[in-house]
Amino acid sequence: MLAIIRCRTFFFQVAIQKFKDQDIYRTIILPVVLYGCETWSLTRQEERKLRVFENMVLRTIFVPRREEVTGKWRRLHNEELNDLYSSPNIVRVIKSRRMRWTGHVAHMGEERGVYRVLVGKPEGRRPLGRPKHRWLDNIRMDLQEVGCGYMDWIGLALDKDRWKTLVSAVMNLRVP
């Protein structure tokens, strides 16, 4: 009986530790990593690096599993990590924050500097080579994922209710 009580307390402590680690990740690590992410212009390679970082942290929180059939320890696969960690992945959070910030900027007047920087076109020539990935390009790609890629994003953002549904759709989209 004493062994059963000790096992229960041990498993209870392990379960609490996982929730503590998740809370630490959610409340301390993510805000530091995502500081200012509303203005980031991410490439696919940078998105992949962020996903790798998140999976690395989640693998330390959710320790390796022991297979019942073979008895060997194995690392958790990415899909298993996504199922265990109920929150959206880090790239989805960045895209939804970027969309939310876009809505704020679209509601600013044309005389505001932020709006002019976002909508305006810089004068002069661009350097040779492949064009840099711009913030506005990311917004258009995010809208394409939701299915509104060819619409005027400023007109969409001015309709607050529709824009909120688009922001939540970007957050909850299950695209790798």
Image (cartoon, helix red, strand yellow):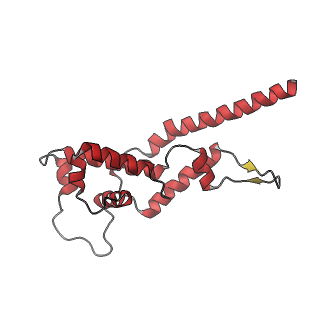
Task: Please tell me in which quadrant of the rendered image residue 32 appears.
Answer: top left
Q: How many marks?
A: 0
Task: Examine the rendered structure and indicate whether residue 29 appears above or below residue 8.
Answer: below
- Residue 21 occupies quadrant: top right
Most extreme residue toward the bottom, as rendered? 128
| Picture coordinates of residue 8, whole percent (x, y) | 77, 29
Could you tell me which residue is drawn at 81 percent across and 25 percent down?
A: 5
Q: Is residue 4 above or below residue 111?
A: above
| Quarter of the rendering containing residue 107 | top left
- Quarter of the image with the N terminus is top right
- Image coordinates of residue 174 in percent, x first then y, are 48, 54
Q: Is residue 42 left or right of residue 2?
A: left
> Is residue 97 something that shows in the picture?
no
Between residue 118 and residue 154, name the one nearer to us: 154
Left or right of 67 on screen, residue 63: left
Left or right of residue 158: residue 145: right
Q: Position of residue 63 (x, y in %)?
A: 69, 45
**Along the horizontal axis of the image, is 161 left or right of 116?**
right
The residue shown at (59%, 48%) is: 83
Q: Can residue 100 be seen in the rendering of this structure?
A: yes
Residue extending farthest left: 111
Q: Position of residue 112 (x, y in %)?
A: 15, 46
